[in-house]
Amino acid sequence: MEMPAAAARTNVSARSRRVLRPGSTGTDGLREVMGFLLLRVEGQPQVVRMLILTSTDYPREGAFSPSNGKGMMSTTSTEATMRGQLLDAVEQVFYARGIQAASMSELRDVAGLPLRRIYRLFPSKDDLIVAFLRRRHERMMAAIEARVVAASSPEDQVLAIFEHLDGWFHEPSFRGCPWTNAYSELGPTNDAVAAEVDHHELEFRALVTRIVVDAGYTRDLADVIYLLVAGSVTTAGIQHALDAAVQASRGVRMLLTGPQARMQVRPGR
């Protein structure tokens, strides 16, 4: 009589723990467990199938064991490396060609990772897109902040935003705003992507506002500058006008020197 699947899984797990010698890892340990169990599951195809499937997940040489104590850190580091490798591939495939036009098979080939591994790291294509957008967002925010810190005057602090945009527009890989692109393709019908795009827009506008206000200019001026920032991104992406940030910065420079640009300091403060 064929053993029920749930009971078979329990027996496999229990016997595996008993037969595996302390410190056995990787292929040696796997070979030991498989040899013991396969002798006992003849005529039980469900168990054989489980053994074949789970054997691919068994720790490889150097994985965590009581004897080395390094596996957890090594696994975490390896997973982080693979995530970065995969998100780099998303840049090349989804951002360059479009989310819907590109396939997961293309992503697999560029990333050099099997599809099963990709889906373990990111269970769905939506998860991949959201992670890609979040990484782009964090890198962009950090890069602008660094330029602002390095600026030598309040005016240069504001113009640092446009210096960053100008460098971005002239990158060979520039294909417009990734958040606008993602929303145009998926946002109206994809809550996760729409929420990530909203997160970027709100955080980016808050950053621009803070930079302008901290430099001593009015919040009203910050609103106008943000519209020039957003307009230059759209112009560069849609019209392929790669000097859009330079043109916008000229207008911003005129605004910053206007009579109403600076915040008024009230007497006694």
Image (cartoon, rainbow, N blue to C red):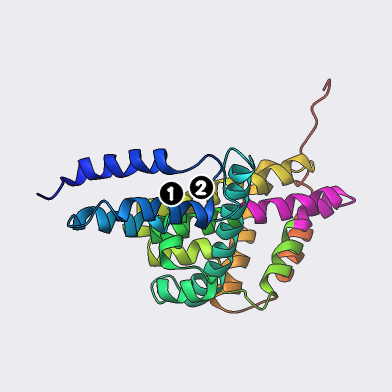
Residue 209 x, y percent position in the rendering: 66, 45
Residue 72 in which image quadrant:
top right
Vertical placement of 133 versus 211: above or below? below
- Locate residue 244 relative to residue 258 in the image: left or right: left
Numbered range of the magenta stretch: 137-160
- Locate residue 157 relative to residue 62 in the image: left or right: right
Q: Residue furthest left?
A: 1
Viewer-nearest residue: 81 or 10 = 10
Q: Residue at x 59, y 64 (%)?
A: 85
Vertical placement of 240 versus 69: above or below? below
What residue does disc 2 label?
199
What residue does disc 1 label?
195
- Locate residue 250 relative to residue 235 in the image: left or right: right
Vertical placement of 99 versus 34: above or below? below
Prevailing SS of the magenta stretch: helix
Residue 151 x, y percent position in the rendering: 86, 52
Mark 1 near mark 2, Cβ–Cβ under 8 Å?
yes
